[in-house]
Structure formats: structure tokens, C-alpha cells
Amino acid sequence: MKYKTKTSIYIDKEVWEKFKLTASKKGMEASKMLEEIMRDEMAEDFLEQALRDLKDYEGREIDFEPVEPEGGPVSELIRVMRDERNSSVS
């Protein structure tokens, strides 16, 4: 179980009211929505720290080779895939 902490911050009243209304429209509590925004903002820092925590992280390279599409430009392939999907749904 994660423990929550109660805190006090100062926010422009109009901004807070609009934020609470936005959260309500999304079916969320304002505190939950604010927590998600904070997590999103810190996600890159968390990822960097996790990578640093990996043993022998320094000097590692990600090894991959780009995939070249077969059969023409990507836009053509996407069009074919959409057509196939539409015909299977109809």
C-alpha cells in the first residue's frame, strides 16, 4: 500500500477552480489528476535514474538496425493496411 501525504500549496484561485472542473469532467479527483501530471513531468528523471542503477550502465549502447519497409513508401503501405482493415470490418 502506498502512503499518501497531505500538503498545502498556494495556487491562483481561478487556476485551481478551472483545474478541479477539468478533473471533474474527466471523472477524476483533482488530487489524482495532479499526481498523474507530476508523475508525467518526472518520468524522464525516473527513467534516467533506473538506467543509472543498472549494473554496468556506463558505456552501454543500444544495438538495433532500422527496419526498411518492403514494397514501397510507408504511406502506400499504410493505405493498403487501412483498406484491408476497412474491408474486414464492413
Image: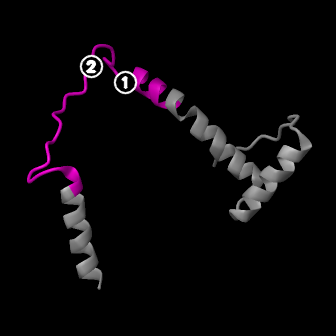
What's the magenta region?
A: 46-75
* Horizontal side of residue 37 vs 78, given as left or right: right
**Residue farthest to the right?**
13
Residue 38 in the figure: left or right of residue 59: right
Rendered residue at 60%/39% (across/down): 39
Chief secondary structure of the magenta span?
loop
Residue 29 within the magenta-colored segment of the rendering = no
Q: Amino acid at mark 1?
A: Leu
Q: What amino acid is found at the position of numbered circle 2 in the picture? A: Arg
Residue ID at (60%, 35%): 41
Q: What residue sits right under mark 1 in the picture?
A: 54
Q: Earlier in the sequence, mark 2 or mark 1?
A: 1
Location of the C terminus by quadrant is bottom left
Q: For residue 77, what is the image quadrant?
A: bottom left
Q: Residues within 10 Å of mark 1 (few under 14, many from 20)?
A: few
Q: x%, y% of residue 17? A: 86, 51
Quarter holding residue 71:
bottom left
- Please state which of residues 12 and 40 is positioned toward the viewer in this rendering: 12
In the picture, residue 35 is in which quadrant? top right
Q: Residues within 10 Å of mark 2 (few under 14, many from 20)?
A: few
- Give the labeled residue for mark 2: 60
Which secondary structure, mark 1?
A: loop
Give the tally of numbered discs: 2
Asked if the residue at tag 1 contacts the one at tag 2, i.e. Cβ–Cβ closer than 8 Å, the answer is yes
Q: Is residue 22 above or below residue 37?
A: below
